[in-house]
Image (cartoon, helix red, strand yellow):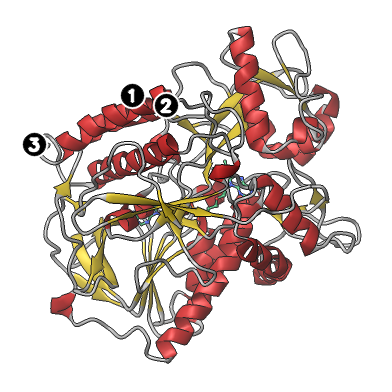
Amino acid sequence: MTERPASGSLQVPGRLRAPQPGWTAQADVIVVGSGIAGLTTALRLRQRVDRVLLVTKTVLSEGSTLWAQGGIAAALDPADSPEEHLHDTLVAGVGICDVEAVRALVTEGPRRVRELVALGAEFDTDEDGEIKLTREGGHHRDRIAHAGGDATGREISRALIAALHRVQDDPGIEVVEHALVVDLLLDATGRTCGVTLHVIGEGQRDGVGAARARAVVLATGGLGQVYAATTNPSVATGDGLAAALRAGAEVSDVEFVQFHPTVLWLGPASRGQQPLISEAVRGEGAFLVDRDGVRFMQGRHPLADLAPRDVVSRAIVERMRETGEDHVYLDARHLGREFLEKRFPSIVERCRELGLDPAVDLLPVAPAQHYASGGVRTDLRGRTSVEGLYACGEVSCTGVHGANRLASNSLLEGLVFANRIADDIAERLAADELPPVPPGQAGRPPGARALLAEAARTRVQAAMTAGAGAVRTAESLAATAADLAALAVRSLDDGAAEPGPQSWETTNLLHVGQLLTHLAASREETRGGHVRDDFRELDDAWRGNQRAVRGPAGLVTTTFHPVPEQDLT
Ligand SMILES: Cc1cc2nc3c(=O)[nH]c(=O)nc-3n(C[C@H](O)[C@H](O)[C@H](O)COP(=O)(O)OP(=O)(O)OC[C@H]3O[C@@H](n4cnc5c(N)ncnc54)[C@H](O)[C@@H]3O)c2cc1C
């Protein structure tokens, strides 16, 4: 481990400005978020722990899980093997994955997918009733299980929520919707002992309260809304990552952001969640062309249009620069109307709503933010550096993605690590390793309080998109950092900011944006989801992970952790 002072210094406040908690609640474990990670953790914990409290920002189904199209990767085909899945994952991660974490993912993955089937998830099957498998970018085997053609996330979410409803009368589990976690509660030793949360409810539990527990699992998903255009839904505001950072948890690899190459381009003014054209469409034979109909991925990578996403995104950005256009095109016309409607019903329907017919029209596409490869750093059991705090799913950094996530590995990560986390917590509670904290000793992290008015959200997004997006330079990152720093100063004394969900989310976007920009500025190379126009090559000196942690006085310290060379041939 080496200390590398990141460019400039970053100061992050200890908590968000919020009213004093007006009510309290208690559980053994609090799970925050109801995507694949949170639902799986809660369902498994409930079998083994007395009181589980699942809280979620809006309704149970909202989150990226619902939107996942392509599928879930697992070596289910007898001709495939976890070892091959491991190799493809390491290659996509460009040399800085945690091999043991990937091994856990790929070896436990097939079993966890079968358990999901046993729970009620209906994957697409062939005439013999076997799960149909397709291929996506970066995979050398057909190993993507899908449901409803291109509605995999919807089916997984449906099955998990149905399973939750089957046990919801059980006193061992409580579910609270419209409950936004604001910050973590810590005891005097720095251990996590609960959360502060804002509930839009009725009766006693309304407004800001404090929920105490022996362990907290953050499963709050991604951070896509930090950019102007993303495939992520509106709840993906990086709340869990920001809260963990403020509470002093170690975060890692946050500079690695996956930009999905084929997001429908709806014009220069479109903002927020944009429609994704799944990689599986290219898996089935669609290809990219520029405005002159030239196939520019051929000869650029052995996998051509199915090269890893960073390679395809970069190629698109470069071709857009060369042609002066702000998009390229995806050609799926030769796949035929019948096939497209059967295999990709949701995509075809969405395109038609927007006046495009994939069987007839070239589809305008451009890269947009899609996935956060880094997050709150965990070990193989999902434990973070803060005692009692766990992170699962997209908010976490288990090490399985390295510099870039392999397509369809993220649903799998949520599934595999949720089980690991639930087992670890259950064992520790049984061994009395995580004793309850008395009410008077649960406090909020020390340091300044911040709040930024909702009106600043578009400025954060514009700054991030302009300077810390798909292609970055020292200059662009410095401009973004300066813009965000001015907002950070304002957030410490923003008279216009009223505490509430919008301003808390906006402040979380600011903190996540500052962290991401800070780490991206230090990494002077191009690797995976971190593309620098001023350092265009891989640099072996950077083969490792950047970790950041906020100290008690608010200063964020960055350390660099080299990774031994991996065989990526
Ligand atoms: C369009 C799209 C397509 C994708 N396709 C695929 C695919 O084919 N295969 C694949 O593997 N991956 C895919 N992904 C990525 C994958 O869907 C996500 O990484 C994964 O679903 C994340 O699951 P999660 O449980 O961690 O988070 P989410 O499913 O995003 O759930 C997060 C939950 O946390 C809640 N939450 C957030 N903040 C708070 C807060 N402050 N308080 C309380 N609750 C909070 C949210 O409301 C939500 O319930 C896709 C993503 C998108 C957006």
- Determine whether, in the image, residue 42 is placed left or right of residue 436: right
Give how far across and how far down residue 105 sits, in percent: 65, 64
- Determine whether, in the image, residue 67 is placed left or right of residue 459: right
Q: Secondary structure at mark 1?
A: helix
Residue at x-position 37% and y-position 90%: 432
Residue 49 shows in the view: no
Give how far across and how far down residue 355 sits, in percent: 62, 19
Task: Using the image as rendered, state which of residue 2 and residue 494 is in the foreground.
Answer: 2
Tell us which disc is closer to us: 2 or 1: 2
Residue under numbered circle 1 = 479
Q: Tag 3: Cα neighbours inside 10 Å, few (<14), some, or many (≥20)?
A: few
Q: Amino acid at mark 2?
A: Ala
Quadrant of res 249: bottom left
Q: Amino acid at mark 3?
A: Gly
Residue under numbered circle 3 = 495
Dot 2 and dot 1 residues touching (CB under 8 Å): no
Q: Which mark is residue 181?
A: none
Q: Amino acid at mark 1?
A: Ala
In space, the residues marked 2 and 1 are separated at their CA atoms by 9 Å
Where 358 sits versus 564, above or below? above
Residue at x-position 53% and y-position 48%: 373
- Determine whether, in the image, residue 311 is placed left or right of residue 272: right
Mark 1 within 8 Å of ligand 1, using the beta carbon: no
Quadrant of res 515: top left
Where 369 sits versus 351, above or below? below
Residue under numbered circle 2 = 474
Where 305 sits versus 387, above or below? above
Tell us which disc is closer to us: 3 or 2: 2
